[in-house]
Amino acid sequence: MLPAAVAANLGAAAPAAYLVCALAMTLIVTSFALAGSRVSLTGGIYAYVEVAFGPFVGVLAGVLQWLVAWLTAAGLLSAFADQLGLLVPGAGQGASRVAIILATLALLAYVNIRGVRPGARLVEGITVAKLLPLALLIGVGVFSIAPGNLAWPGWPDGDALGGAVLLLIFAFAGIEVALVPSGEVRDPARTVPRAVYLALGITTVLYLAIQAVSQGVLGGELQEQATAPLAAVAGRVLGEAGRLLVLLGGTVSMFGYLSGDMLASPRSIFAFGRDALLPRAFASVHPRFRTPHVAIATHAALTAALAASSTFTHLALLSNVGVLTLYFLGCAAALRFVSRPAEPGAAGLRLPSERIIPVAAMAVILWILAHATARELAVLGTTLVAAALLYALRRARIRPQA
């Protein structure tokens, strides 16, 4: 859905937003690589922030991680219902749309309550299927590009570019997941940077190719295809069968993400219950399947409620504000690590001007966040205040017991 949204902001200059995003993510993931090579703990950004700034800021980062996962899943669930509505006319509206959202989350919650292995197998089975339609679309669509549709109109206005980048971060976010198992990776100083740069390079090339084919085939019509732009491209170059294939591929892709999210994100709620940030009931484990069934059901219910009441674009922007704030904290942690004197014989990635990289990353993040609306920033502020209150309540409960 993003190619149409970016084209609506920038027209044929849309590739500029991808390049700016790629530059921003290069600075950000380089900062994370600097941190990850010095903190050999599983947990990614959350681990870096907690080590650098202590448990309070760590809690804020942990809550932000769950908020981003919740908003992202709800946004994609909303888009998933819209895509099904195109495959089955009428299914994406009114009560039918709500029924699709509830049934999807109920199914995924049930699968994951029954155990980790079924959920992981579901994710694995979908991964290849979601990439094949994209590869076909690019391979065939490149021969149908009208060069005039790709004529460069000049560098876009700063506000329009910033708004497009704020939305497009949604497509790039997640590359840092490669850093989460840093504590279980051999030679992290070498392996972690290679993993994130390879992921970023492949992602950027793939997205630019998709945008170029979409813009080249549809031209100005692209921004009018807000619900399913790639299906419209496929319909133009492959006919109705191609349109249905890409719609199905998009639906499978979103379902695959939701499957992975239901496997991972409820564990954050479980951890909050275990660590007394939430009532202990959220840390309950199913007596038979040994899974955090209360946390899974809670995450599913919250995601369904949000998806049924909002739209993909709105939720994507809210998610991006959260993830950029989390990235800012991660880059600040990286700056703190590289500013400390290195211990004799300590391993760690060393780069020229390594203190400048996290500072530049934080500056770019602030520039992107400057294009967020007051409402989006208010959601972020409310979440951080709630996290701070939960932390204070936990401290108050623990202190008398000590």
Image: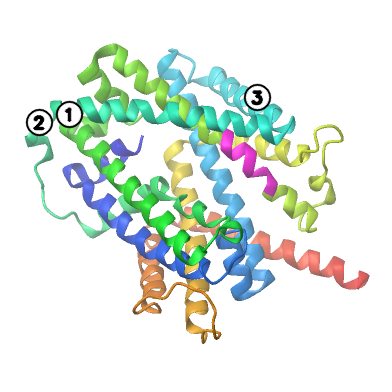
Binning the other alpha carbons within 10 Å of mark 2 as few (below 14), some (14 to 19) or many (20 upward) gives some
Task: Kindly give the residue lying farthest to the left in the view shown.
Answer: 148
x%, y% of residue 153? 10, 48
x%, y% of residue 285? 82, 41
* 205 relative position to 118: left or right: left
Q: Earlier in the sequence, mark 1 or mark 3?
A: 3
Binning the other alpha carbons within 10 Å of mark 3 as few (below 14), some (14 to 19) or many (20 upward) gives few
Quote the CA–CA distance across marks 1 and 3: 38 Å
Quote the CA–CA distance across marks 3 and 2: 44 Å
Residue, disc 1 = 217
Task: Kindly give the residue lying farthest to the right in the view shown.
Answer: 401
* 254 relative position to 182: left or right: left
Residue in the image at 50% along x and 38% along y: 75
Residue in the image at 22% along x and 52% along y: 16
Magenta span: chief secondary structure: helix
Identify which amino acid the numbered label 1 is placed on.
Val
Quote the CA–CA distance across marks 1 and 2: 6 Å
Q: Which residues are magenta?
A: 259-267
* 24 relative position to 266: left or right: left
Q: Secondary structure at mark 3?
A: helix
Identify which amino acid the numbered label 3 is placed on.
Leu
Asked if the residue under mark 2 is in contact with the one under mark 1, i.e. CB atoms within 8 Å, the reply is yes
Residue 146 numbered mark, or none: 2
Residue in the image at 73% along x and 61% along y: 390
Identify which amino acid the numbered label 2 is placed on.
Ala
Establish if 395 lies above or below 153.
below
x%, y% of residue 37? 51, 68
Binning the other alpha carbons within 10 Å of mark 1 as few (below 14), some (14 to 19) or many (20 upward) gives many
Q: Secondary structure at mark 2?
A: loop
Residue, disc 3 = 107
Establish if 122 lies above or below 341.
above
